[in-house]
Amino acid sequence: MITCLNCRTQVRADAHFCQHCGAPLKQIGAYRVVRTLRADGNVYVVECDKKMPGGAPKTQIAIEAARSLSTHLFEQARQMARLANVVPLWNQARDERGVPYVIVGYAPGEPLDQVSTPLAPKRALSVALQLATIVDYAHAHNLTFDVKSPRGASVDSLTRFQKAFLLDERDRLYFFDHTIWMALPRTGKAKYQDEDVLRILRVFLRLLTGTTMGKIVGALKQDSQQLASVTGHLVKNPPTSARNLVGAITQMLPPQPSPATTIKLVDRATQAMATVKLPVTPALASSAQTDVGQKRDHNEDNHLVLPLDATSALFAVADGMGGQAAGEVASQIAIDELRQRAQSEWTRVAQTPTPENIRGHLHGWIQRAHTRIVARARERNNNMGSTVTAALICQRQVFVANVGDSRTYLWRGGELYPLTWDHSVVASLVRAGLVEPDAAYSHPQRNEVFRSLGQKGELKVDVFEPIELGAGDHILLCSDGLWEMVRPPRLKNILSRGLDPAVGCAELIRAANAGGGEDNITVVLIQIE
């Protein structure tokens, strides 16, 4: 028996609160237990009267752990808090019995396993997108989840996984249970990553349908109503990584309008008199320039300016990835394949220059580049890849395609219009309304793309409807080294000067380097006169 210091009553030694006055009896290191947060586990709201290092708040959460985190794992877990969806890990402590606890920040919401289901499809997709984003970030930091039941508990692994997350009333998801981290092993890493992806998928299906994955598979076999159209592809063809799952979920979100729908139409009187001056002399109507930037020691970007005939030309920017001299090889393959295919096939395409025919060939050229990069990566036994954005101008129209986060813009009438969508983790979060557009520039996952040439599995290429061009229009293609360093107001300021394309490219690259030059910078600027 112990004595309650508040009312001096004798209570059991294993009690956490006085049964007479309700005062807390439990102490976890320097932290005083204020109340129990969850009845189904040893999770407490705690306070510390001492001034804590690092600006830690007075009120925090203590979670019982099976064992203390190693110094290395503790630091890895703390790095996870760079992600807004991860509650900060502040400390570790032990109670009077020597039981270890982790001390984390306070977060609102209810455990994910207790969320009432089914949710509306958009809500379920939003939660799954956040879940996949957190897991992808963990994998990038060589972390996975140890979801074995804690001491004295009998909880299945999926429930244990869900209990580590809180969902607030705005459908914001927070990871807070840092006790379940474990380092990804050097061997068998893919097995753990696959298991994490499967857990996300199972959670998503539970939120969407209120039932288990096994029952859903059974329903799909019977082609149950609209369930097959919503979940069938994910169940039958599960993504190979958390990042690919982000992409798959993004495709299931409500469709976005085409980027071209908000563009001001060309003035018809002007259009009737306008002629498109093609870049037969690149310095006259177009320019392409690239720069290594301020932080990289080599350039993995490549670009293309290719006149096809008197009224047509193809432009492209490719941003390689993969390291160890793989990135520049991948982007060069992409550009070379586009050049070769366009040169060999354009005469035939130009005989039937319908939008469908042009879009189909542009799509095929990019797919061919993807196939070649996959083959080269297999030869080299590496994971080389590349983004690409391409603009094909034909008879006063521009056809735009992209894979990844290289972009194409239209500058018209003082406005800057994006013509492509980024295939990136952050772009998906912005699209779902989970991250503000301005916050995307500093988001820790801003460089993570889920679609690229050279990726495993099927590649989806965005090829957009053509846009009519008029006098004074400018088309800008660029790698992320430009748009991440130069925000739209500054881009508009430079383009509004009416500079010669070569001077404009130089000014844009100068602005990107002045903004930090964190990546290679490639710009293609086309002026329609």
Image (spheres, helix red, strand yellow):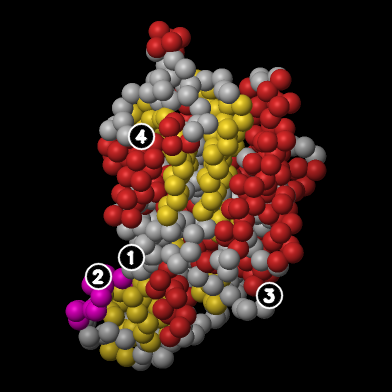
Residue receiving disc 1 = 106
Whether residue 351 is in magenta: the answer is no
The picture places residue 54, in percent across and down from the top left corner, at 25, 75
Q: How far apart are the alpha carbons under marks 1 and 2?
A: 9 Å
In the rendered structure, are the residues bearing label 1 and label 2 in contact, judged by CB atoms less than 8 Å apart?
Answer: yes
**Is label 3 in a helix, a strand or a loop?**
loop
Q: In the image, what residue occupies the spot 45% across and 67% down?
A: 297
Residue that label 4 marks? 500
Neighbor class of circle 4 (other Cα within 10 Å; few <14, some 14-19, many 20+) is some
Camera-nearest label, 1 or 4 = 4
Q: Report the mark closest to the observer, 1 or 3.
A: 3
Seen from this angle, which residue lies furthest right? 221
Q: Quadrant of the N terminus?
A: bottom left
Q: Residue 124, percent across and down?
A: 53, 45
Of labels 2 and 3, the one closer to you: 3
Q: CA distance from mark 4 to mark 2?
A: 55 Å
Residue type at numbered disc 2: Pro
**Residue tagged 3:** 188
In front: label 4 or label 2: 4
Q: Is residue 136 visible?
A: yes
Magenta span: 49-61
N-terminal label among 1 and 3: 1
Give the structural element (helix, strand or loop) at label 2.
loop
Residue type pointed to by label 3: Gly
Residue 203 visible? The answer is no
Secondary-structure class at tag 4? loop
Within the image, what quadrant is residue 268 found in?
A: top left
Q: Position of residue 51 (x, y in %)?
A: 19, 79
Whole-number angstrom distance, CA of label 3 to CA of label 4: 55 Å
Observer-nearest residue: 354 or 350?
350
First in sequence: mark 4 vs mark 2: 2
